[in-house]
Amino acid sequence: MASWPAPTPLETKPAVTHSTDMTLRTHVVDFAPAQQAAVRRINAVLARAPRLRTDAWRIDAGQRLSLWLDAAAGAITVPRLRKRGVTVEIVQTDGDQPVPLRILQPEGPPRAVILDIHGGGWVLGSAGLNDRLNAHLARHGFCVVSVDYRLLSERRGIYIEAAISDCLAAAHWTVTNVDRLGAATVFLTGESAGAHLAALTAVALRDQGLIDLVKGCVFTYGVFDLSGTESVRSAGPETLLFNGPTMQADLARLAPERDEAGLRRSDVSPLYAHLTGLPPALFLAGEYDPLFEDSLLMATRWGEASEADLIRVPEVPHGFLHFGGPAARGARGAVRAWLNGRLKS
């Protein structure tokens, strides 16, 4: 973003939208021609790839594979991180349902603590598999606490409330252990399903009087309305990554006992929560993502109550941080620049 000092290939054209009391600053990425061509090559590969589906047997198979990948990745990433001065520690929260936390500690005293909630559609992923996304933060002096919340499973009867509870327990542990972690300032981040859980966690921390240590939130292509925004409802078969025509039904399966009105309740859909008293937030969203409208609407509402920045990335799909190329590199730089700006404010 133009006003941020960190060098990044993610050049943006800022446009400021003023509300009555606060401000939403919208920034549109301006790719150079070679970068735009790289983005389109990634999209062409994704267009030929199978779409993500949420049938119970696919989820069970994916979770078993995820466990294997988590173990295999840990054997590779931990030594690599150590070579770069980043150490990895595993701890658990207290209570009847302990939540594993993966802590990436930088070399030297941390500048701030980042509580990270991974994505994966609430059914896949892990804190360990997010090492690749979090390593750049640890290398730049941030202590990253990543949450291994319970993954949803219809077969095992685990639904969205379990993941929400785990993330809040992780947040409680983090804000009460800042002395141990080495920095008193906390940021809250999440991507995709993790952004949904991070937003709900921020609201819960505010309601419990624990938000003061949180200096800001970063939400990357989040899901903020489980009933499905208009862009989700209109997603077609050409949608990249997702099976567009079933997206709304897939979201509803996260809380099967709820009707559409229940899915809009603020305890599961942060778009409908009261957002006063929350810290500034950065939203990043790809314009080819059927969940783009979630970020646009949430950033607009957040900007009515606090400071908010929205980075719109043209022609990129959901999950672009995982696909490399100029969008992923630029987004990492933009996030670090925003965090640096919040630390200086």
Image (cartoon, rainbow, N blue to C red):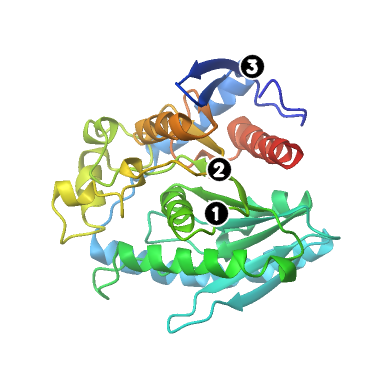
Which of the marked residues, 3 or 2, is nearer the chain's N terminus?
3
The residue tagged 1 is 211
Point out residue 60 in the picture as x, y percentages from the top left corner: 32, 69
Point out residue 211 in the picture as x, y percentages from the top left corner: 55, 54
The reply to whether dot 2 and dot 1 touch (C-beta < 8 Å) is yes
User: Of the residues shown, which amino acid type is indicated by label 1?
Assistant: Ile
Badge 1 local density, few (<14 within 10 Å), some, or many (20+)? Answer: many
Residue lying at 31% horizontally and 55% vertically, measured from the top left: 267
Label 3, secondary structure: give it. loop
The reply to whether dot 3 and dot 2 touch (C-beta < 8 Å) is no
Residue lying at 28% horizontally and 43% vertically, measured from the top left: 243
Mark 3 and mark 2: Cα distance apart in space: 33 Å
Vertical relation: 153 (above or below) 190: below
The residue tagged 2 is 279
Which of the marked residues, 1 or 3, is nearer the chain's N terminus?
3
Q: What label sits on residue 8 in the rendered view?
A: none
